[in-house]
Image (spheres, rainbow, N blue to C red):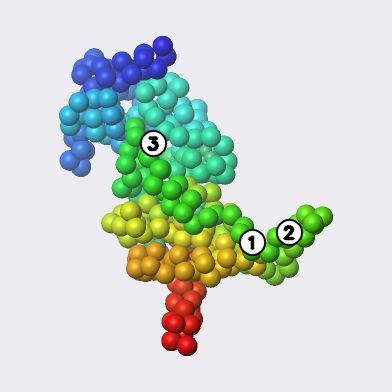
Amino acid sequence: MLIRTFSKFSLNFLSDVRVLTKSLVNGSSVYSFPQENVDKSTWTEFHIHRYLPEVEGQSKRFVQSYWVNTKQCGPMVLDALIKIKNEIDPTLTFRRSCREGICGSCSMHINGLNSLACISPLIPNEKMVIGPLVRMPIVKDLVVDMTNFYNQYKAIDPWLKRKQPKVPGSKEYYQSMEDRAKLDGLYECVLCACCSTMCPSYWWNQNVYLGPAILQQAYRWIIDSRDEFTDDRLKKLSGDFAVKKCYQIGTCTATCPKGLNPRDALKNLKELVHDYQERAASWQSA
Ligand code: SF4
Ligand code: SF4
Ligand code: FES
């Protein structure tokens, strides 16, 4: 019942001139709820890219403006989005869960970079422009379809693989502190896809190129001293597109909200793949 009410609201509100006004900003149609009495020293304007799949034709895509009193709101972009959804427009759709930068579900495009809304601070008195992750299929508003991304993750076998069975009675695979330290800066990835969806190579080759997030995870298992499928993993990445489509430009690293460095991980991974290819060629010529 609730869902039907929201759906009806979202279908009707574009034509409801008593509620919304339309203007043109940088060539985009911007729809605004009238908020004439806004004190702009304490309120921030949000321009949010919306997509309503249930609306016919061109009007399913538009930009909507909302004003939020940042004095009555938490400090992060996600706090403002939740306030908008609770108090202004229940049809606004986005993903979130942990509110701590851990689950990776609130990834979106914020003021020119991809980030996690729950750890992105609001900038007082500055307009916030928010959209879905770049060049991903949109389900609704800020929610994108992550199916391809998760299938790519599945394809790298993201778990410890062993050839030697565990000795009966033993519980753990031991690792030296030095080997464990090599995983720092890799294991912290929350798979938010911010880096992959800022990567131009991933934009153009999403069906064949795994992208920085997934390749960084592949690298994490390749260098794990406990894993015994290192060469098998490297062999899988030796195709034309798997790692070669990384040109080391680094927009992945520039956008990572967790401060990780996928560009460096991919640089190291490319070297390991190259080294494996040379070894494989020498086996064939021997
Ligand atoms: S460094 Fe590689 S993975 Fe990162 S954005 Fe550039 S091409 Fe993409
Ligand atoms: S490397 Fe950073 S941006 Fe990329 S998926 Fe992991 S946490 Fe997100
Ligand atoms: S809500 Fe979990 S990372 Fe933002």
Query: Residue at horizontal 42%, vertical 26%?
Result: 84
Left/right placement of residue 189 relative to residue 26 reads: right
Q: Are marks 2 and 1 in contact (CB under 8 Å)?
A: yes
> SS at mark 1?
loop
Confirm whether residue 182 shows in the render. Answer: yes
- Location of mark 2 (residue): 166
Q: Is residue 157 above or below residue 232?
A: above
Could you tell me the amino acid type at mark 1? Arg
- Location of mark 3 (residue): 143
Query: Residue at horizontal 53%, vertical 34%?
Result: 97
Q: Are marks 3 and 1 in contact (CB under 8 Å)?
A: no
Q: Which quarter of the figure has residue 248?
A: bottom left
Label 3, label 2: how many angstroms apart (C-alpha)?
A: 42 Å
Label 1 neighbour load within 10 Å: few <14, some 14-19, many 20+? few
Q: Which mark is residue 183?
A: none
> SS at mark 3?
strand
Query: Residue at horizontal 77%, vertical 60%?
Result: 167
Q: Provide residue 82's location: percent of width, then percent of height.
A: 47, 29
> SS at mark 2?
loop
Task: In this rendered view, identify the residue nearer to me: 169 or 262.
Answer: 169
